[in-house]
Image: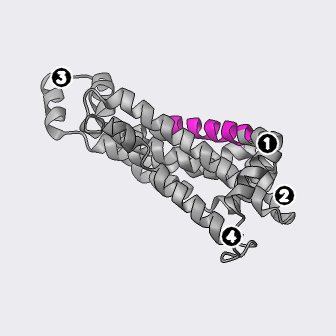
Amino acid sequence: MKMKWIAFLPLIPLAIAILLIEILTRYQILPSYLAPTPSEVFSAIFVDSKEIWTAFFQTAKAAFLGFLMSAFFGILIGIIFSSSKWMYRAFYPYAVFFQTVPVIAVAPLLVIWFGYGTPTVVASSFIVSIFPMIASTLTGMRSTDPALVDLFHLYKANAFDFLFKLRLPFCLPQIFVGLRIASGLAVIGAVVGEFITGGGLGGIIEVAKTRQRLDLVFAAILMATLIGFIFLSGMNIFSRLVLRNWHASEKNI
């Protein structure tokens, strides 16, 4: 019974915050041009439900594709960098580019290269979310217990055994850290891409902003947050299923 109550604890500050904002805006303590009342935001979700839910699934699809691409290529590049010092020294600075480049600045270039629509949004999502996967995989691969490495050398393990029976299992917790970070960044990248190409929740935010529909802007932001929450929850469940029987990070939860 105690654990069931703990699961609902995050809802308490959320409910308090919603109630407080509702009171402040209704009594003009918080100006309406800064934030709509929560009731107006939820009303916008229901009144414009068809438009918002269509955009929700459009953004979710693009963000998920970008996230999958970043997970696959990020893990692959991290493995390559950890296996070859010259590859790491030659190409890692270019991998850092994906972390430092402002995606809003390169988004127009993505439109030129990929055109308007989903490919540009997926590319934007991919660019934003790939570096955490590279960095976390690389850190995990390099953190393999030296004693276990010596043991594998003692038993003359081949490269396949080193990778799939030692290094990859050992760095799984780090990979899941990267997946959690990338899952949220993928949504951010997708919405930024939609600012340029239109469509999805990013397109709704842009249009609603010009129409002074602050309630619709907040409604779209709330739905984008929901996508990120779903992605992150999925990664937490996946991590729990994979690591719960052997790693302390999940066994102690």
Q: Distance from label 4 to label 1 (Cα)?
A: 24 Å
| Residue located 68% across and 54% down the image | 221
Identify residue for label 4. 25
Looking at this view, is 115 or 219 the one in front? 219
**In the rendered structure, which segment of residues is drawn in magenta?**
57-73
**123 with respect to 67 (left or right):** right
Identify residue for label 2. 207
Q: Which of the two discs, 3 and 1, labels the residue nearer the N terminus?
A: 1
Q: Amino acid at mark 2?
A: Val
| Residue located 22% across and 22% down the image | 157
Identify residue for label 1. 49
Circle 4 packing at 10 Å, graded few (<14), some (14-19), many (20+), is some
Looking at this view, is 222 or 59 the one in front? 222
Residue 64: say if magenta: yes
Q: Amino acid at mark 3?
A: Lys
Q: Which of the two discs, 2 and 1, labels the residue nearer the N terminus?
A: 1
Q: Amino acid at mark 4?
A: Thr
Q: Position of residue 217 (x, y in %)?
A: 75, 58
Q: Nearer the viewer, mark 3 or mark 2?
A: 2
Secondary structure at badge 1 equals: helix
Q: Is residue 59 at all visible to an observer of this figure?
A: yes
Circle 3 packing at 10 Å, graded few (<14), some (14-19), many (20+), is few
**222 with respect to 167 (left or right):** right
Identify residue for label 3. 156
Q: Would you place residue 111 above or below residue 233 in this image?
A: below
Please say if the residues under marks 3 and 2 sit with CB atoms less than 8 Å apart.
Answer: no
